[in-house]
Image (cartoon, grey):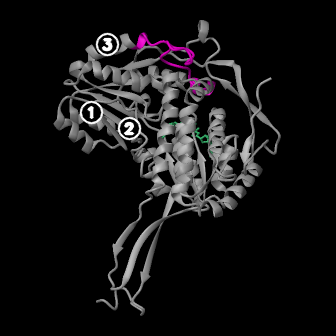
């Protein structure tokens, strides 16, 4: 009988009020049930928000360095449990062990960063325009934060939201993706073990359309940090507007790597393989377009196809495996449908292009690493996020044209340029429309202490990560203290 898990509300593990559960399965072997998780609804969210609101009044008064001390303990516990969590995460969502270890490490980095931020949370002191008057701006917490996360980074992304939220003095209602409830449960267990008081973090499992929507529309939730698809992000933006919540959206991407004819081709090859097929292409920062200079096109394509054919598909728990499964049946169907679209658009299928279901792969959602050549920049496979192991290769004749192609989508998350020309590198940094630009590095590999996010329809201008996320989770309060003993009117008495 599979293990049954619960929601965590006001310090108690509880069933959904509906009493219903749904099974979460291993995407590399659908006979393997990871657990049964609550199918919650609006009434469970009401309870969680009530707890978070009541606790906020105490939690906001705890000194930030003391909150930071708890974050440090969370980091320590994540270090201690890193290997177990990585195994559990690979079983739950399929990416290979090295990558799930990296996912936990990102949570550890975020915890330690937050711990030290407790001793910063800098404000500003500025001179007043009047004598005997003091002026400063300080950060204050906001209230209850709804954190809604995707499945592709089941530890890292929740920590990017929850840790800065609570360090800043807010309380949290957390809804993880339906495909990764187990890793979310482990994260909450670790936070409790580290000493987070009851009610500060509340976990509610369930479907996005129901549980997620109940958080977004709840009048007593002050802000939403959402990481997921652009389609749902736009819907959340509309749904949250009725209560004028603060909303941070980190959404999809159609990231490109440019390889110029002066690049180190071996280095660029390692980069594109990792960027396109790491996490089975299921990263918001995945390299889904390769923009290749015509002078090296044939040679590089030959190298790329040869290496791609050697990638080993399978269960990510085995150390020899390079690429795991798609997350679920629906996602594999989307990948398959884009491959058909690419063929119908006239792109040249040079590698892969089929479901992989032979032998050990029979019970998983595997898809062959796939490459299309001679892709035109306007084709759908060059414009739309596929979120799977599919790379579209576009030929270019010049650096300027390559930058134009890279910028020619509605998205603007990550970008990469391989060149040995320092002048071009700096021109690219200036001209590329993206939140992240890598030079001689693939499009994936963000570090936890730098701002993370995108421009155009990848988001709405906020940033996760580093110091920037604290701007989202705090409000500025300006404070004036007049010690002159008389009424001094700004702009009037001094001019
Ligand atoms: P998704 O379908 O948009 O779901 C994200 C989260 O939103 C899940 O927890 C989902 O719940 C929930 N949700 C669904 N409908 C909702 C609604 N109407 N109201 C509120 N919440 C709702 O995305 P995904 O498939 O999990 O993840 C893949 C996408 O995330 C890709 O587009 C990828 O590019 C993007 N992503 C972006 C970043 C970034 O930082 N820019 C990082 C990682 C991933 P259920 O799971 O129950 O449906």
Is residue 12 toward the left or the right of residue 395 in the image? right
Label placed on residue 473? none
Residue 326 on the magenta segment: yes
Q: Quadrant of the N terminus?
A: top right
Marks 3 and 2, Cα distance to the nearest angstrom? 24 Å
For label 1, the crowd category at 10 Å Cα-Cα, with few meaning under 14, some 14 to 19 and many 20 or more, is: many
- CB-based contact (under 8 Å), mark 3 and mark 2: no
Q: Earlier in the sequence, mark 1 or mark 2?
A: 1
Q: Is residue 464 above or below residue 478?
A: above
- On the image, the x and y values in percent for residue 390 come to 45, 23
- Foreground: disc 1 or disc 2: 2
Q: Earlier in the sequence, mark 3 or mark 2?
A: 3
Residue 53 on the magenta segment: no
Label placed on residue 303? 3
Marks 1 and 2, Cα distance to the nearest angstrom? 15 Å
Label placed on residue 402? 1
The boundaries of the magenta stretch are 308-333
């Amino acid at each position: 009988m599979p293990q049954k898990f619960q929601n965590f509300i006001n310090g108690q593990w509880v069933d959904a009020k509906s009493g219903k559960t749904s099974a979460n399965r291993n995407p590399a072997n659908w006979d393997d049930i990871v657990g049964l998780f609550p199918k919650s609804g609006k009434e469970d969210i009401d309870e969680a928000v009530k707890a978070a609101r009541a606790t906020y009044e105490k939690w906001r008064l705890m000194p930030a360095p003391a909150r930071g001390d708890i974050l440090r303990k969370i980091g320590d516990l994540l270090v201690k449990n890193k290997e177990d969590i990585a195994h559990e995460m690979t079983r739950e969502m399929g990416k290979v062990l090295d990558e799930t270890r990296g996912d936990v490490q990102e949570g550890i980095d975020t915890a330690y960063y937050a711990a030290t931020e407790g001793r910063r949370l800098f404000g500003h002191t500025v001179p007043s325009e009047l004598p005997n008057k003091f002026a400063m701006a300080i950060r204050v917490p906001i209230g209850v934060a709804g954190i809604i996360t995707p499945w592709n980074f089941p530890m890292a992304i929740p920590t990017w939201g929850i840790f800065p939220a609570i360090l800043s003095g807010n309380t949290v209602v957390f809804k993880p993706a339906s495909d990764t409830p187990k890793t979310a449960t482990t994260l909450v267990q670790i936070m409790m073990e580290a000493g987070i008081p009851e009610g500060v973090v509340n976990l509610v499992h369930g479907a996005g359309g129901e549980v997620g929507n109940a958080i977004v529309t709840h009048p007593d939730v002050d802000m939403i940090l959402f990481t997921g698809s652009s389609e749902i992000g736009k819907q959340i933006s509309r749904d949250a507007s009725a209560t004028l919540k603060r909303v941070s959206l980190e959404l999809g991407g159609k990231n490109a790597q440019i390889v110029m004819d002066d690049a180190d081709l071996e280095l660029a090859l390692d980069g594109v393989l990792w960027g396109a097929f790491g996490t089975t292409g299921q990263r918001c920062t995945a390299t889904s377009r390769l923009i290749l200079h015509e002078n090296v096109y044939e040679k590089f394509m030959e190298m790329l196809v040869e290496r791609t054919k050697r990638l080993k598909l399978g269960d990510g728990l085995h150390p020899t495996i390079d690429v795991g499964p798609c997350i679920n049946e629906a996602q594999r169907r989307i990948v398959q449908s884009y491959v058909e679209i690419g063929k119908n658009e006239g792109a040249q299928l040079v590698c892969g292009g089929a479901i992989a279901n032979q032998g050990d792969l029979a019970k998983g959602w595997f898809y062959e690493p796939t490459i299309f050549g001679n892709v035109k920049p306007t084709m759908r496979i060059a414009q739309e996020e596929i979120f799977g192991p599919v790379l579209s290769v576009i030929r270019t004749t010049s650096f300027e044209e390559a930058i134009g192609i890279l910028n020619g989508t509605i998205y603007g998350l990550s970008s990469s340029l391989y060149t040995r020309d320092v002048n071009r590198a700096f021109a690219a940094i200036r001209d590329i429309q993206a939140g992240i630009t890598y030079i001689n590095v693939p499009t994936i590999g963000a570090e936890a202490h730098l701002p993370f996010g995108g421009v155009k329809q990848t988001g709405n201008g906020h940033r996760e990560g580093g110091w920037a996320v604290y701007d989202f989770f705090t409000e500025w309060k300006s404070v004036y203290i007049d010690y002159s003993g008389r009424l001094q009117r700004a702009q009037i008495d001094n001019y």
